[in-house]
Amino acid sequence: MTAIGLPRAADVVVVGGGVMGTSIAFHLAEAGVRDVLLLERSQLGSGSTCKAAGGVRANFSDEVNIALGARSLEAFARFGERPGQEIDLHQVGYLFLLETAEQVEHFRESTKLQNTVAAHLPPTRMISVDEAVELAPIVVPDGLAGACFSPSAGHCTPESVVLGYATAARRLGATLVTNCEVVGIDAVGNQISKVRTPRGEVRTGTVICAAGAWSARVGELVGVELPVVPLRRQIVVTEAIAGLPTRLPMTIDFGTTFYFHREGPGLLVGMSDPDEQPGFDVSRTDEWIPRLTAAMERRAPALLDVGLTGGWAGLYEVTPDHNALIGEAAGISRFLYATGFSGHGFLQGPAVGEVIRDLYLGREPFVDVSPLSTDRFRSTIRPERNIV
């Protein structure tokens, strides 16, 4: 051993210990891959995963994203059996609030696509404004043109998902090492030969990058461009609110991205800040609060009278088209990547773990992820539109 807990060699080194990395480690170990090593620069889940809102859904505008979301929804529903962990899953649905005829038509099209690609799930459906308010009484109907409801979606606890995958991966023989940053990746010719860390070196022929917002740095170590930019997103939690429905859906005001779901007796609330600049700063600020309160005043004004009990900031890992990067680099053997999920990485973690396992083993994944290769940026960009 080169250091306590760090082996001299591994068949596969997974970089990143969030939901993506732990899912990949679990699926590889479950498939019988020996000597799987996961390296995390801090603590498991300490990057973007445990700062996520925990939403899980399959309603997207792109077939690949729908397939990944639907497969993951099935895995979350069975998580207590495999890998074996309670994740506090609430399948209360996703409710998108729509203000314009264009938004309604867009969701009508994406709903049709989703119900075709994920026909095994309870169907997503377009609903009236009155039905939307009945589902989420805290919402005011003024200015709404319609809504979309996905009953099989919902939210769960990100920390528990990471714990479940990590525990099962270790049980199956994988080694997970925390506080161990990858600072170098060496190659002989075009073949990866070792990974370097402050705690020692590990011989390996395969590296899988699942480093989230830090992925561009990992790619640079081996000369692979991963166009991922970190972008801060903030969340607040409210005090208890009387009269909240037990099955309040994850509710999103699509035009502003203002969203909320139940968090104990109160609400977890977030919104994309259009003024946020790229960077690794995860300090909490109040600069975005006026924009959040403006969205609340328009869509759920009762929340303006509710106090806050806390909150946090995390990082989105954003690509130019808001779609993930999944695949294997062509210029060096073997460097695989699963990153750049632009806000929907947590909800796609189970399915992407399967996909990376199959790419590593030379199997055909359940969905063709070639459109998510980094090569796509050499051609026409087709952005994912159902981003929150």
Image (cartoon, helix red, strand yellow):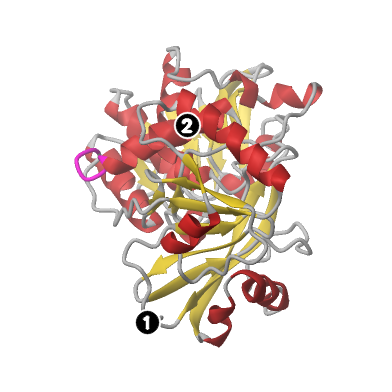
Report the Cα–Cα distance between label 1 and label 2: 36 Å
Q: Mark 2 points at which residue?
A: 68
Judge the density around disc 1: few (<14), some (14-19), many (≥20) Cα neighbours within 10 Å: few
| Residue 171 versus residue 54 in the image, above or below | above
Q: Mark 1 points at which residue?
A: 242
User: The N terminus lies in which quarter of the figure?
Assistant: top left
The reply to whether the magenta stretch includes residue 13 is no
Q: What's the residue at 24%, 35% (across, down)?
A: 172
Q: Viewer-proximal residue, 181 or 354?
A: 354
Is residue 52 visible to us here? no
| Residue 210 versus residue 241 in the image, above or below | above
- To which quarter of the image does residue 365 belong? top left
Q: Where is residue 174 in the image (x, y as percent from the top left)?
A: 32, 36
Query: Upstream in the sequence, badge 1 or badge 2?
Result: 2
Q: Position of residue 92 (x, y in %)?
A: 36, 54
Number of on-image labels: 2
Q: Where is residue 78 in the image (x, y as percent from the top left)?
A: 25, 40
| Residue 341 versus residue 224 in the image, above or below | below
Q: Looking at the picture, which amino acid does disc 1 mark? A: Ala
- To which quarter of the image does residue 254 belong? bottom right
Give the magenta part as a residue range: 78-82
Q: Position of residue 194 (x, y in %)?
A: 54, 30
Q: Viewer-proximal residue, 216 or 344?
A: 344
Q: What's the residue at 19%, 40% (across, down)?
A: 81
Q: What's the residue at 50%, 31% (across, down)?
A: 114
Judge the density around disc 2: few (<14), some (14-19), many (≥20) Cα neighbours within 10 Å: many
- To which quarter of the image does residue 322 belong? top right
Q: Viewer-proximal residue, 209 or 325?
A: 325
For the residue labelled by badge 2, is the local secondary structure a helix, a strand or a loop? helix
Q: Looking at the picture, which amino acid does disc 2 mark? A: Leu
Position of 349 compared to 5: left or right? right
